[in-house]
Amino acid sequence: MIELKNNELTFTFPDVHPDAQLTLTFQRTLRIPDDDDTYALPPGLGTFPLKHVDDFRSKIPPSWNEHGGVMMPMFQAEAMWIDFSSEDIDNRGEYCFIVKIATGKVNAVTGEDWRDSVNRAPQDYLVVPTQPWLDGYCVEKGTIRQFVAMPLGAGYTAEEQVTGEARVGGVQIVVYPMKREVFERRFPVRRWREDLERRHSDEIMYSPAPEAALEETVHMDMGLAPGGKMRQEIYDDPYDLADWDLRHRSRCFVHLANSMTWRAVTGTEPPTKPPTAKEYSDRGLPWFDYYAEVPAVDGGGALGKSLKSVAQVSVEKKDALFSEEQSIVPAVVRGVGPAQRSGGRVREW
Amino acid sequence: MVNGLGEHIRERREALKTTDKAFSLRQVAQRVEVEPSYLSKVERGLEVPSEATVRRIAEELGANPDVLLALAGKVSSDLQQVIRKRPELFAQVIRDLAQLPDHAVLRVVREVRDGTW
């Protein structure tokens, strides 16, 4: 089952394990430059607000009622990333989950049209806690294109590029837990010393890259489109497909409302626009690189590689959306690994 | 005046002070923006602070503000607002849940509805 508390989606599976719990938040962030460079991970600037669509049934489109789920506000061309965390259970470790993420029913890992099944070759899902975050569409091994909100129907979204239609929009999430007996076998209870060693690791600091303000549109539905490139790996599933309890799943549709729609439907203000990447970087604030000793999947596939970024589509359409955007060089990139991640939020400053 | 709040705050602050001297009465009072003598009275159950002060104390001590407010005999203003909107319904719900064990109350949660997509 899924609960919404404090802008967090909590997936629980009491029939599998009473403490199996995956928490997912949508993080506000900078939009990285949509140029030829590949950037480090931008920071988290707080969570997006989330609300049950059922609380606003008389004000939302019939399709939102049909899809159920929750909704959140995004400005046009605003970026976001998704944070995953799960709870340590009985001093064994964090419970493991499979997470499938799609936007407009286009799989963010493979770039393929939505399939209900879980597929290993090619892997079309993420494994949590191995995968701490997802910032965009995997377009090739180790590289993603950032999730950027664009109006559905304007030709920018991954959905429109892959399916040729603007019908679904939003974000779709499906979560499956690991089988309890497999979790308990693979993760025996840790002794205190192992726990201490697990928590100990170093943080690496080293030195090594705007946007134009965009007008909001009156489109009711938003979708996600591929933005600038960033270094992020989609980690290979270290377990067997049979380890996952595919009989139990929870799924959630996240509708994206532009700021005007959000105000009209909820009567509340959306968060303010985040700073530009240049403004942020000019202040010397940190960007992030994540290191984990886990192999990465190829991801993307032919469809992923052919996805055009928002800037590329805008040039073709002569929209000149990001005409004033400049490349930047992040002043500080902070290297982080699983140990820092398990200690709490690490993509903050 | 007995409210349980003062004892709870003192125990928690003293526990924190064993590992961090910044949790002395004086320093905590300073961070919570009250006089040390006032915080001392609160801890002895001689004063009941305002909701805003209770919240600052809870934040400072890493305590649950709803628990501290309940110990002070108060209900958080946001909850009061919720109840005032539908008093009959919430009064009924609370009375119905009053006798249930914790695990059963925790099962009464609102799920995110999944539709067709």
Image: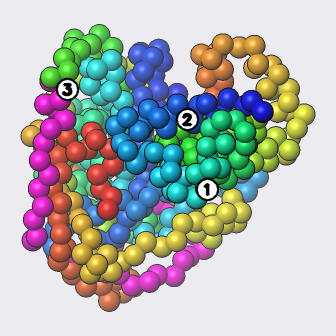
Q: Secondary structure at mark 3?
A: helix
| Residue A256: image tag | none
Q: Secondary structure at mark 2?
A: helix
Q: Position of residue A313 (x, y in %)?
A: 32, 75
> On the rendered image, what quadrant is the N terminus of chain B found in?
top right
- The range drawn in magenta is A194-223
Q: What amino acid is at disc 1?
A: Val
To which residue does mark 3 refer?
A: A195
Q: What amino acid is at disc 3?
A: Asp
Question: Are labels 3 and 2 assigned to the same chain?
Answer: no
Q: Position of residue A258 (x, y in %)?
A: 56, 67
Which residue is located at x 73 percent, y 57 percent?
A59
Q: Splitting the image into 4 quarters, where does residue A40 fall?
A: bottom left
**Number of other residues with Cα within 10 Å of mark 2, as a class: few under 14, some 14 to 19, many 20 or more:** some
| Residue B10: image tag | 2
- The label nearer to you, 3 versus 1, is 1
Most extreme residue toward the right is: B88
Question: What chain does mark 3 sit on?
Answer: A
Question: What chain does mark 2 sit on?
Answer: B
Q: What amino acid is at disc 2?
A: Arg
Pick whichever, B66 or A11, lies toward us.
B66
Q: Is residue A248 among what the camera can see? A: no
- Decide whether residue A181 is among the magenta residues: no
Vertical relation: B112 (above or below) A231:
above
Pick whichever, A57 or A165, lies toward us.
A57
Which residue is located at x 42 percent, y 21 percent?
A19
Q: Secondary structure at mark 1?
A: loop
To which residue does mark 1 refer?
A: B34
